[in-house]
Each structure stands twice: as C-alpha cells, then as structure tokens.
Image: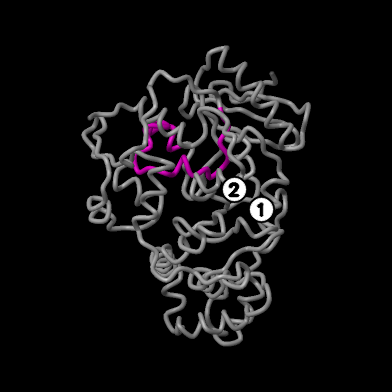
Amino acid sequence: MKLNRRVLNRTTLDRQLLLARSPLSPAGAIERLVALQGQDVNPPYYGLWSRLASFTQEDLTSLLYGKQVVRGSLLRSTQHLALADDYLWLRPMMQAPMSRARQAGFGRATGEVDLDELVTLARGHLAGRTLTRPQLRDLLLERWPEVEPMALGWSAQALVPVVHAPPSGVWNRGGATPFTLAEEWLGRPLDDAPPIERLVTRYLAAFGPASVLDVQMWSGLTRLRPVIEAMPLRKYHDTEGRVLYDLPDAPLAEEDVPAPVRFLPAFDNLIVAYADRTRMMTDEQRKAVCVGAVIFPTFLVDGVVAGMWDIKDGVLELRPFGPLPERAMAELAAEGAGLLAFAGAPGGTLAWRHPSEGRRASA
C-alpha cells in the first residue's frame, strides 16, 4: 500500500496530538511523545501547551520537582525531558551514541585520560550531592590539570548518567547546569539491557509510519535495519518507493481531515523526527528552520510548516514563508493570542514580518 504525503502528514499530526488538543495529562502526553527535546528551558512548556486541552506551567514544573519527569541527555545526545520510568531504559540505550559523540568532540583532547577513572572520579564527586558542570569540571581538573577543561566536564556528562534537577528545566530559569546522579535522584537503578524493540515501538506509536533511516535520525542509534525488519510490523511504501514501518494495529488518518494552525517550539522533536521531513516541510523550508544544531520555532498551517515565530518583550512575531490565506492569518492571530497569554503576556502584540517586506508590520 502506498501512502502519499498528505496521509503521512495527517497521521503524524494525529499521533503528535496536533489535530486536536488532547485530554491527556501532561505526564500522559510526555509518555505518548517519548520525550520532549529541551535544550532550552521554555520550549517543552510551549510544546505541551500546543498539544493539550488543559495545561499550565505549574503542571510541568510540579512533575519536575516531583521526580515524575526528569531532564537529561538522551536522544541524539541532546537534552530531553522524559518520564522517570522511561529515562531508566532510554539513558542506557543512548550510551553508545553518546560515547561516539563524546569521542568525536573531545576524543583528541582527552587522549591521555583514562575514561574508566574519569567515570569513577566523577561518580565519587557527585555521590550524595549536586554539582554544576563547572564545579565538577574543576574537581576533575585537579586530576588532569593539562586537559582542556570543557572536555572534562562534557565527557563526564556523556559517560555518567546524570539528571539536571530542578530548578534546571523550570520555566524561565537559567543558570549553570546541575548534575545529580540519576540513580540517586530517582532512587532506582537504570535498566541493564533494555531491548531496542521497545524504542522502535514507542517511536512508531508517536511518529509512524516511518523508515529505518527516520528511526535512526530521531534516536541517534545506528544499524537498526535488522532489528526493525525482524519485528512484526506492518509495511507500507511512500510515493517515492521508500519502505515505511508501522505498528500492526495503528490507524492511519484520512487525508482530508482538517488540521488547525499550531505553534511548535524551538527544537520540537516533530521537526527532527525524520530523515525525510517532506511530510512536514519542503527542503527549502528545512534549510531555514534547521540551521546547524538550532531548530527554530515554527507554525503550522494546514498541517505543514508555513513559517517561524518568536516571542520577545510581549511581541509575538510571525515570519511566514509566503502569502497566507486570510482565514489562516485569522486563526494564527487567535492561536497567537492564547500563546501570548500562556507566556505571561496577555494583551501582547502580534506582528508579521513578511519575507518580501524586510520589516515588521503590526496586526
């Protein structure tokens, strides 16, 4: 069976809770989505606001303080928020790609460092207390004073399972990243050998149908083809002939289902969940949205990326990639007013910056 982009788009939006705001709890939504990418503090809050029928900033903050949700390095070696139960198996599964990323970034700088000793020392320094990355770095420098300081701090983060305890990850809270041993924070050991099939199943439930390359792009894992092909999954093809996999009983959405406008935050996992992202945006749009390690906030019109946005000083600026129908602009204005209120700027200004104008025009 061949699936066109429209069916893939609507199915993805449905599984991402973006066709209609969901009655799920915030914890239930995070579980559904596997994890929320959270290099910056506020995007996970925006992402849940766009997906849930009822959500406040305190809802997520209380989950972080209550240890039901934790923040740490996970998929693609980047910061994510995940349920504590999921962190216990996700973090061990990510160790191999995190070690590769560490080696690529800091292998030369730490060539003379015994990594097993580094892990032992870092764990010892963190036992029973929380340290910021600079504090842990400086303690490790006492053992390796000739090594690049940044390499030591980031190596410890990559090799030792740590979580960033609140107030790290809390709305509008910045500062140095704190390290706490994950087992101590959660009071439970991490899984020894979690099955890869668990990750594939969870990914497809949230992002499927998808190709092997899509799963690898999202997770940072490699050589998944034998695993996926051995699973009892349903196979489709897209219009380009690529093989797509899905859970056997997972429904597909109808291609004519209406899709409301939605705001996606910076680094939203939906935008980086596929090797082939044409179900969500054109290749040209991808170049504007995904710049190096930065994923800019986007808004969706008729289910696909139609522009980028930003909030600063009570102004929500919308930068569409091209002309928009009046109805879409009205819907964006209404949804944008809700976004401003959520961000703590009720009555804020909505502004448009059209590519052809090069200036801002208030609406």
- What kind of element bears circle 1? helix
Mark 1: few/some/many CA within 10 Å (<14, 14-19, 20+): some
How far apart are the two marked residues, 2 and 1, measured between alpha carbons? 8 Å
Q: Compared to 331, does 36 lie above or below?
A: below
Front residue of 360 and 234: 234
- Identify the residue position indicated by label 1 in the image: 63
- The answer to whether 227 appears left or right of 279 in the picture is left
Q: How far across and how far down the image is residue 10, in percent?
A: 42, 28
Count of all numbered marks drawn on residues in the image: 2
Quadrant of the rendered image containing residue 255: top left
Residue shown at the point (57%, 51%) measured from the top left: 38
Q: How far across and how far down the image is residue 242, in percent?
A: 24, 38
Task: Looking at the image, tell me whether mark 2 or mark 1 is earlier in sequence order.
Answer: 2
- Identify the residue position indicated by label 2 in the image: 27
Residue shown at the point (52%, 60%) measured from the top left: 87
**Mark 2 and mark 1 residues within 8 Å of each other at the beta carbon:** yes
Question: Which residues are drawn in magenta?
Answer: 262-287
Quadrant of the rendered image containing residue 354: top right
Q: Compared to 350, does 17 lie above or below?
A: below
Q: How far across and how far down the image is residue 77, in percent?
A: 47, 60
Quarter containing the C terminus: top right
Front residue of 277 and 88: 88
- The answer to whether 348 appears left or right of 28 in the picture is right
Q: For residue 271: magenta?
A: yes
Say what amino acid the circle numbered 2 marks. Answer: Ala
